[in-house]
């Protein structure tokens, strides 16, 4: 909300009603004037923050009104946005007026009205001052600081970067670029508080929404809204509902955790380009009200638990073992103790079937958790070695050579010989 005052000088009752109906709910104090004389009088009384001025007024023009404003020491610094159906023909008249900061072509949409007024409110005082003093107008309002940390993913991965920030207990926003998409990790003392995306492919978002569990399926529209991490009126409305206990914060936390897991998994499967990290607290209201305070490992495992991708199912001939940790992050926040049991079992190589028997879990759960640990690079898989030797009798020279080649490429899972004559077979 804002306490800014907007003075509308327009002889059209329809325009005045439109502006009032749109800008008042947006938090502006809107004052209306149907003609130039009344508008100038009101301007002197209330000193508005911005004047929305019609170009064609009864008995005068917007240009003449602007000149009268400039001639008044009290009113000359009030910024003006001129609106007209004549567009370029009308706008040319205002080029040399220091108090005119923008143009709003008629007819205009409600969104264009809101955007133009909001931008003018923020920049107008600076523009009027710069134009009247003959100084250059800055190209941006808030100059971006240089990133505290920036680079590309040519020599290391996302896990290594997040581990570094976690180990250093850093607070800020890490933004990574993957093709056209940008994924932002909001961190507090190294822990992930929220993950949001922008520029995402609509098909990717649809796939994520389709993986919502039944307990969260009713919140699919909310997920589409929160995915971008926007600070818009709808999101602010959700925050207010949370504050008023109208929405269940536990359910929303589960939704934001699901969202974070989907975006993290998406990032790990993409070809990443560049990253930059901005230190300091971020203005996102959702994760401030519902912080996840979770580890990367927990999100990767959760994403695997929601996955139905058959390509991720482990091969029957794979066995799994813990990787040797060299400076790797050990944060397990948010990971269920139940799933930590798998990591404790893998001091020696084990196949999924062995893990399933020892823990009494379903085959699906075992493989999903294993996939999450593999993506987090805490465990690795190897091909199992089949014990015992074999002999293959193949008299055809070409076929025998092909068999030998296939056995050599089998990661030593098979041990034996291929022979071409009966004597060699007997020996």
Image (spheres, rainbow, N blue to C red):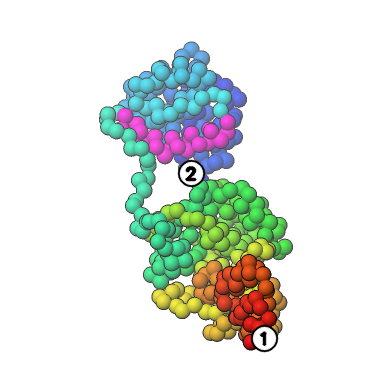
- Residue that appears at 55% across and 38% down: 24
State the CA–CA distance, disc 2 to disc 1. 94 Å
- Please identify the residue farthest to the right as the structure is shown: 214
Q: Is residue 337 visible?
A: no
Q: Would residue 114 be seen by someone viewing this image from the given angle?
A: yes
> Which residue reaches farthest top?
59
Could you say which is closer to the camera, residue 334 or residue 86?
Answer: 334
User: Is residue 262 magenta-colored?
Assistant: no
Left or right, residue 348 beside residue 187: right
Question: Which quarter of the image is occupied by the C terminus?
Answer: bottom right
Task: Kindly report which numbered mark, 2 or 1, lies closer to the viewer in this rendering.
Answer: 1
User: Residue 341: x, y in percent?
Assistant: 59, 82
Residue segment shown in magenta: 109-131
Q: How crowded is the residue under tag 2: few (<14 C-alpha within 10 Å), some, or many (20+)? A: few
| Position above or below: 261 against 360 | above
Is 85 or 183 nearer to us in this picture?
183
State the image coordinates of residue 297 (x, y, percent, origin top left).
53, 71
Q: Earlier in the sequence, mark 2 or mark 1?
A: 2
Residue 246 picture location, percent across and down: 65, 59
In the picture of the structure, the residue carrying the numbered disc 2 is: 2
**Mark 2: secondary structure:** loop
- Please give the name of the residue rendered at 67% of the width and 73% of the height, measured from the top-left corner: 395
Task: Examine the image and state in which quarter residue 349 appears.
Answer: bottom right
Was residue 120 drawn as part of the magenta stretch in this picture? yes
Q: Residue under label 1, please give it.
A: 426
């Amino acid at each position: 909300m804002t306490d800014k005052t907007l003075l509308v000088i327009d002889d059209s009752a329809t325009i005045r009603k439109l502006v009032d109906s749109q800008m008042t709910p947006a938090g502006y104090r809107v004052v209306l004037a149907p003609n130039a004389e009344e508008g100038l009088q009101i301007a002197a009384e209330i000193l508005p923050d911005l004047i929305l001025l019609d170009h064609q007024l009864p008995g005068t023009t917007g240009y003449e009104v602007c000149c009268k404003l400039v001639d008044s020491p009290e009113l000359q610094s009030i910024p003006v946005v001129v609106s007209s159906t004549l567009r370029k023909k009308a706008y040319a008249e205002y080029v040399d007026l220091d108090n005119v900061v923008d143009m709003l072509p008629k007819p205009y949409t409600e969104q264009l009205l809101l955007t133009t007024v909001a931008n003018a409110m923020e920049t107008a005082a600076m523009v009027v001052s710069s134009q009247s003093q003959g100084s250059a107008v800055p190209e941006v309002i808030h100059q971006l600081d240089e990133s505290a940390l920036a680079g590309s993913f040519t020599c290391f991965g996302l896990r290594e970067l997040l581990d570094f920030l976690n180990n250093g207990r850093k607070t800020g926003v890490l933004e990574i670029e993957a093709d056209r998409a940008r994924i932002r990790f909001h961190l507090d003392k190294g822990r992930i508080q929220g993950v949001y995306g922008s520029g995402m492919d609509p098909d990717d978002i649809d796939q994520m929404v389709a993986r919502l569990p039944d307990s969260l399926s009713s919140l699919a529209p909310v997920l589409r809204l929160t995915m971008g991490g926007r600070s818009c009126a709808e999101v602010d409305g959700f925050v207010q509902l949370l504050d008023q206990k109208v929405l269940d914060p536990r359910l929303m936390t589960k939704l934001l955790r699901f969202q974070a897991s989907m975006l993290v998994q998406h990032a790990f499967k993409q070809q990443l380009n560049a990253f930059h990290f901005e230190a300091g607290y971020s203005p996102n209201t959702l994760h401030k009200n519902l912080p996840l305070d979770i580890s990367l490992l927990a999100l990767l495992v959760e994403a695997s638990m929601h996955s139905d991708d058959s390509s991720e199912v482990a091969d029957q001939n794979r066995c799994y073992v813990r990787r040797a940790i060299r400076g790797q992050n050990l944060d397990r926040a948010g990971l269920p103790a139940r799933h930590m049991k798998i990591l404790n079992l893998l001091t020696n190589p084990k196949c999924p079937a062995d893990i399933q028997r020892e823990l009494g879990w379903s085959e699906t759960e075992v493989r999903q958790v294993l996939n999450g640990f593999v993506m987090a690079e805490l465990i690795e898989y190897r091909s199992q070695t089949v014990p015992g030797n074999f002999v293959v009798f193949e008299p055809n020279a070409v076929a025998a050579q092909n068999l030998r080649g296939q056995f050599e490429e089998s990661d030593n899972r098979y041990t034996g010989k291929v022979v071409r004559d009966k004597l060699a077979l007997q020996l």
